[in-house]
Amino acid sequence: MQALTNRAKPVDRRPMTFVERMYLPAIAKGMAITFKHIFQKKEVVSYPEQKREFSPVFRGLHVLNRDAEGRENCTACGLCAVSCPAEAITMEGAERKPGEEHLYREEKYAARYEINMLRCIFCGFCEEACPKDAIYLTETFAPSNYKRESFIYGKEDLLIPMPGEKKKA
Amino acid sequence: MAEEKKLFKVKIDGIPVEVEPGTTILNAARQIGGDIVPPAMCYYSKLQGSGGKCRTCLVKVSKGSEADPRPMPKLVASCRTTVMDGMEVANITSPEVLDARKGVVEFLLLNHPLDCPVCDQAGECSLQDLGYEHGADGTRYEFKRRTFEKIDIGDKIQLHMTRCILCYRCVYTADQLTEKREHGILGRGEVSEISTYIHKSLDNEFIGNVIDVCPVGALTDKTFRFKNRVWFLKPVDAHRDCDKCCGKTVLWLRGDEVFRVTARKDKYGEVEAFICDTCRFDKKETKDWIVEGPRKIDRHSVISQGQYVGVVKPHDALPDVLEGRQPKLLMNIHSISQVNRPEIDLSKIEGPAHSDDFKN
């Protein structure tokens, strides 16, 4: 077979010498590497107690934002869904009725808004496409679960709580 | 007998074309086609007397005619100016025209709200395209934009005067397609507004066409209002036997649901034939229609997103492997997803959906 690069190294297939067959020098060499790492800086953290810091550009779980008065920003314009390369976002819009002005910022809002976290690739295009500052990617993971059903995130999972209110667990 | 008509030789952006006397520069350019066709927001070839309002079709006439080769002193509206023999016109080759068009777009957008995320016309809006191609990305306007309350023109048409650019297309449509004109423009200049006389509802067989002729989202279909974005729907050509109109329409589908019905529009955004209100508003079932096939949408339009051509569905190997057993861990997304639930038929709801439609 022709090599694709010139970096391939041919395997040495000569029979081993007596010293090599003893394996002791090889074991000693390996142990030296092991013991060297004991004195080096530890790279692991004990995870649940100690958490590694996220990079400033980390993109995690989505939230739907509210404005300063607690009204939903999303107007179901569909730009997040159209920009989504994984086609994970779906929504259905509705018209705001008189008397619902404290709930929704614009006359149209997303009555249903769903992100399929199994499809989502966390690219952040939805956040970039959003003209209303409604969707943001946070610095959290989607929590693990045994069931796939729980990865379909609806509006109740995504919306941030009203100011002064705590999110239900 | 019939004397052969003398054709006028015109050059538009250096491309020669021979047209009949009396043709406008815009129509001469449309005979050539391509990028050199000036955009038009108000001119509509199917409506008599339209044009001359929006000024987006401005072109430079660098040579008046063979007899009088002087250039025209100012840019002219190509939809209203007829050609002369030997006329030379510059459209996209003239930086002056492009600069003027940018200014016109800025003027059109002065009072136009930036509510494209809410507007149902987004994705098929002429002003959106025009602003994208020619406009500046910011506004220099510092004053309050004029705003109006929403008006219902009839029970199926919503008028958002705030978005109107006063192209008068709908007025001509109401005037020419229907027998009784009840709809016109009140006021002058900045305060002018489209109105029905004393909010009289327009019940006429063809009044729904004002939705199709509107280049912006000022007149929208109330039966489609806020139901979906046009680019998530699948447009298909369809027809039915209609005793009032030709019955040739485009259905905008989600699955098997007919979300809206429009007339077929050509590449200049003009309808091929006007359709009646029965076809447009009342026939919202696929069984009312004979579907001809998917509508060809320009590749550069956002509506073409997700419309994959020549998709080959891969063979589903699961039934072969399972040999008749049912998979235990298969998740049907429709059993979990709250979107597009079978018991909430958005296309059947009159007018926009509200919070009570989603309660359950």
Image (cartoon, rainbow, N blue to C red):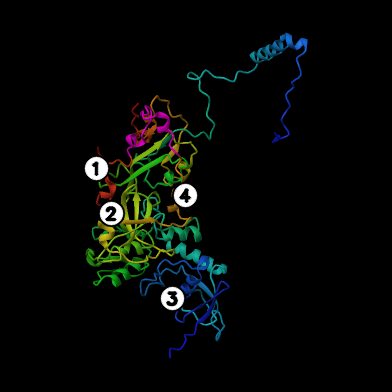
Chain holding disc 3? B
Chain holding disc 2? B
Q: Position of residue B349 (x, y in %)?
A: 25, 49
Q: Which residue is mark 4?
A: B310
Q: Above or below — where is B111 with respect to B184? A: above
Q: Which residue is mark 1?
A: B356
Comes first in the chain, label 1 or label 3: 3
Badge 2 and badge 1 both on one subunit? yes
In the image, A133 versus B218, the foreground residue is B218
Comes first in the chain, label 3 or label 4: 3
Q: Which residue is mark 2?
A: B223
Q: Residues within 10 Å of mark 1 (few under 14, many from 20)?
A: few
Per the model, the C-alpha gap separating discs 1 and 3 is: 50 Å
Comes first in the chain, label 2 or label 3: 3
Per the model, the C-alpha gap separating discs 3 and 4 is: 44 Å
Q: Depth-wise, is mark 2 or mark 3 nearer the camera?
A: 2
Q: Which residues are magenta?
A: B315-338
**Residue B346 can be seen, yes or no:** yes
